[in-house]
Amino acid sequence: MKTLDINDIRNLLPHRYPFLLVDKVIALEPGKSLTAIKNVSYNEPYFMGHFPVKPVMPGVLIIEALAQATGLLAFETQGVVPDDDELFYLVGVDKARFKQPVYPGDQLLLQVEIHKSMRGIWKFSGTATVDGQLAASADLMCAERGA
C-alpha cells in the first residue's frame, strides 16, 4: 500500500491552511480506495464560532475533508500531478449522514472508494470515523476541470 505525507498532499491539492483538511494518507490503492487522517485541533479557526461553549467540527468541513481525499485518490489513480490550470471540483453530495459530533483532539479516519469514473466525472463513497465509530458518511461526485 502506498502512503502520502503532507508534502505529497500539497503537491496534489491546491488547498492551504486553514482549508487543507487532510494531514496524511496511510493507505492508497490507485483505482480503488484511499484512507487518510485528519487531526482535529482546537487551534483551527472555525472552533471560535462553532460553538464557543462546546466546540464541534462543522459537518460541512467533514464532507470537505472527504472531498479532498477523493481528489487525492483521483489524481493518484490517473498518475498525474495537477498543474495550476487543473482543479478537481466537488459537484454533488448525496446521502450525507452525520452520526456523532467530532471534537477537538479527535482523529478523523477518512475512507473513500471509487465507484465510477467517466469523462472527467468521478463517483465515490466516503466515511469519516473517530475511534472506530462512524461520524459521517456520504456519496460524493467530483469533476476534473481546467481552472
Image (cartoon, helix red, strand yellow):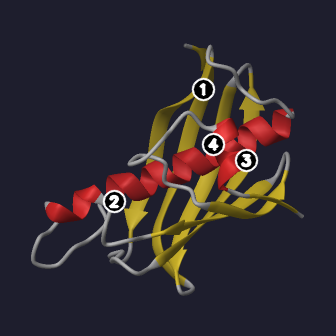
> In the rendered view, would you say 125 is above or below 53?
above
4 and 3 marks in contact (CB < 8 Å) = yes
Kindly identify which numbered label has been placed on residue 143. Answer: 1
Alpha carbon separation for disc pair 4 and 3:
5 Å
Judged from the image, the secondary structure of the residue bearing numbered disc 3 is helix
> In the rendered view, would you say 96 is above or below 47?
above
Kindly identify which numbered label has been placed on residue 8. Answer: 3
Q: Nearer the viewer, mark 3 or mark 1?
A: 3
Left or right of 8: which side holds 146? left
Looking at the rendering, which quadrant does residue 147 occupy?
Answer: top right
Alpha carbon separation for disc pair 4 and 2:
23 Å
In the image, what residue type sits under mark 2?
Gly
In the image, what residue type sits under mark 4?
Arg
Residue count near mark 4 (Cα–Cα under 10 Å), binned few <14, some 14–19, many ≥20: some
Identify the residue under disc 2: 59
| Foreground residue among 121 and 53 | 53
Q: Earlier in the sequence, mark 3 or mark 1?
A: 3
Judged from the image, the secondary structure of the residue bearing numbered disc 4 is helix
Kindly identify which numbered label has been placed on residue 94. Answer: none
Judged from the image, the secondary structure of the residue bearing numbered disc 1 is strand
Could you tell me which quadrant the N terminus lies in?
Answer: bottom right
In the image, what residue type sits under mark 1?
Ala
Residue count near mark 2 (Cα–Cα under 10 Å), binned few <14, some 14–19, many ≥20: some
Q: Earlier in the sequence, mark 2 or mark 3?
A: 3
Identify the residue under disc 4: 10
